[in-house]
């Protein structure tokens, strides 16, 4: 049988030579443990409903653009859900940057508002895929270089994660792991499905069950029908079959099957008992199930022998073209509760400064309602959570809520002001990448002001 520790420490083999491993990497400070947790809201989250104008003029302008949605709230089961006096007013430490303007969160996000108030959460407004800084006039005149297929789910989701449209092969989550040189199979982990975000040139992602139920593959228990020889034969097949195949593709497939079986067996054994993820799980909350699995993987970092990990959790339902008043409160409330529960477990484990969670989505949405929902946009507001974050701040400029402002793409959809390259590079800088590595992983970073976004001290 495969030795568990040898498997965990060495399955990925020796570190391969890579252009993402320049000599400067040797001088980088990569002491201690750090993890990044990407929360992907599939479908295009309406983040105009996440960061809402709270001063009276801003709220009125916001409400004017959403009158049909607000009418649906008023006629529904939760009539005051977006009333100004129900919003959770934010008191950011950098509030002076916004003059008389004020902002609030929806009432169902009280758990995340608490994290903001204690300094463990920050907003990054109007983030999106960009090649270079652009103005509204340049976009109108079509003289700006912009990403292709803006508003396309598959292409913009891929561009957020990998800087190119559908079909991209490697994402920046995997590439930053290439750069830091982690070679364990337990460094890039998805708690839902395979994702380009976690795939690198050398890094290979591990997909784990979203519900945290790690079960041994059929036939990998001690016996089958009381016969140990059958079990040993199955083990032998997965261990040795690839060596006897002449077709390279088939060898890779069988090796991948064998690695998957081995991974699940290792994890089933290690998690056979209480774990730190147990306190994260909330009945009926899918986000919390995935984040509990992430917490469990973080809790096993020493057993895995890793100092850096990148995770992704994801869930759909955010493409709210209609019935937004019925859907968004549950989506935002469930996400808020799950992130707060996850952060509480990370705090209890003494890892608050070592784990940073951040959000992304396909794109933002229009501020102007289409009737009972909103349509595809471009830039959106996002959240970063963790003890190392310069929290209780809004890191960037929040566009006006009235129409026809300088970042208005169309119908209140936003032209991004902070690029995904800037957003990702700041997270990767905290993770331990050098300046030269950041330029390799984030190809458009050099086109933007490197000091414009400072999420960490």
Image (cartoon, rainbow, N blue to C red):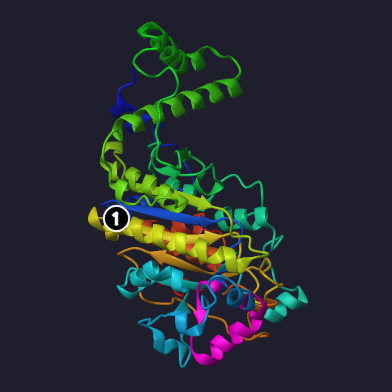
Mark 1 packing: few (<14 Cα in 10 Å), some, or many (20+)? many
370 is within the stretch colored magenta: no
Q: Is residue 52 left or right of residue 345?
A: right
Principal secondary structure, stretch drawn in magenta: helix
Q: Which residues are magenta?
A: 49-70
Q: Give the camera-side residue of 63 and 151.
A: 63
| SS under mark 1 | helix
Viewer-closest of 381 and 215: 215
Q: Is residue 179 above or below residue 242?
A: below
Residue 403 picture location, percent across and down = 66, 85
Left-right relation of 395 to 345? right
Q: Residue placed at 63% from the left, 78% from the top?
A: 71
- Image quadrant of residue 223? top left
Q: Is residue 62 magenta?
A: yes
Residue 436's image quarter?
bottom left
Decide if residue 80 is in sight here: yes
Whether residue 401 is visible: no
Image coordinates of residue 279 in percent, x first then y, are 30, 50
Q: Which residue is mark 1?
A: 346
Q: Is residue 5 above or below residue 154?
A: above
């Amino acid at each position: 049988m495969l030795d568990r520790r040898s498997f965990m420490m060495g399955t990925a083999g020796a570190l391969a030579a890579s252009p993402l491993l320049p000599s400067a990497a040797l001088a980088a400070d990569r002491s201690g443990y750090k993890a990044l947790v990407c929360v992907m809201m599939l479908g295009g989250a309406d983040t105009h409903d996440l960061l809402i104008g709270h001063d009276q003029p801003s709220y009125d302008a916001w409400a004017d653009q959403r009158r049909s949605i607000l009418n649906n709230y008023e006629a529904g089961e939760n009539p005051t859900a977006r009333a100004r006096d129900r919003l959770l007013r934010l008191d950011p430490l950098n509030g002076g940057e916004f003059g008389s303007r004020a902002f609030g969160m929806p009432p169902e996000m009280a758990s995340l508002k608490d994290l903001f108030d204690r300094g463990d959460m920050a907003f990054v407004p109007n983030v999106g895929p960009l090649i270079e800084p652009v103005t509204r006039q340049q976009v109108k005149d079509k003289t700006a270089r912009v990403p292709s297929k803006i508003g396309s789910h598959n292409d913009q989701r891929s561009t957020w994660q990998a800087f190119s449209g559908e079909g991209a092969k490697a994402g920046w989550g995997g590439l930053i792991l290439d750069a830091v040189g982690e070679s364990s199979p337990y460094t890039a982990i998805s708690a839902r499905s395979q994702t380009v975000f976690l795939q690198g040139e050398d890094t290979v992602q591990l997909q784990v069950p979203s519900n945290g139920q790690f079960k041994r593959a059929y036939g990998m228990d001690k016996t089958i029908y009381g016969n140990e020889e059958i079990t040993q034969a199955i083990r032998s097949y997965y261990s040795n079959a690839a060596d006897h195949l002449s077709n390279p593709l088939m060898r890779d497939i069988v090796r991948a099957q064998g690695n998957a079986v081995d991974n699940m067996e290792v994890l089933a054994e290690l998690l056979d008992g209480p774990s730190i993820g147990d306190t994260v799980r909330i009945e009926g909350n899918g986000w919390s199930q995935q984040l509990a699995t992430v917490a469990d993987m973080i809790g096993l970092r020493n057993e895995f022998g890793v100092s850096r990990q990148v995770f992704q959790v994801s869930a759909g339902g955010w493409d709210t073209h209609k019935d937004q008043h019925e859907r968004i409160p549950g989506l935002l409330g469930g996400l808020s509760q799950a992130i707060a529960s996850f952060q509480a477990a990370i705090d209890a484990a003494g890892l608050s400064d070592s784990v940073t969670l951040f959000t992304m989505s396909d794109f933002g949405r229009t501020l102007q309602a289409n009737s009972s929902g909103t349509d595809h946009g471009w830039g959106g507001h996002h959240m970063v959570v963790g003890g190392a974050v310069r929290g209780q701040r809004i890191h960037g400029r929040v566009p006006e809520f009235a129409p026809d402002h300088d970042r208005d793409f169309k119908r209140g959809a936003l032209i991004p002001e902070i690029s995904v390259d800037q957003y990702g590079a700041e997270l990767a800088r905290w993770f331990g990448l050098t300046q030269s590595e950041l330029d390799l992983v984030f190809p458009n970073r050099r086109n933007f002001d490197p000091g414009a976004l400072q999420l960490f001290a």
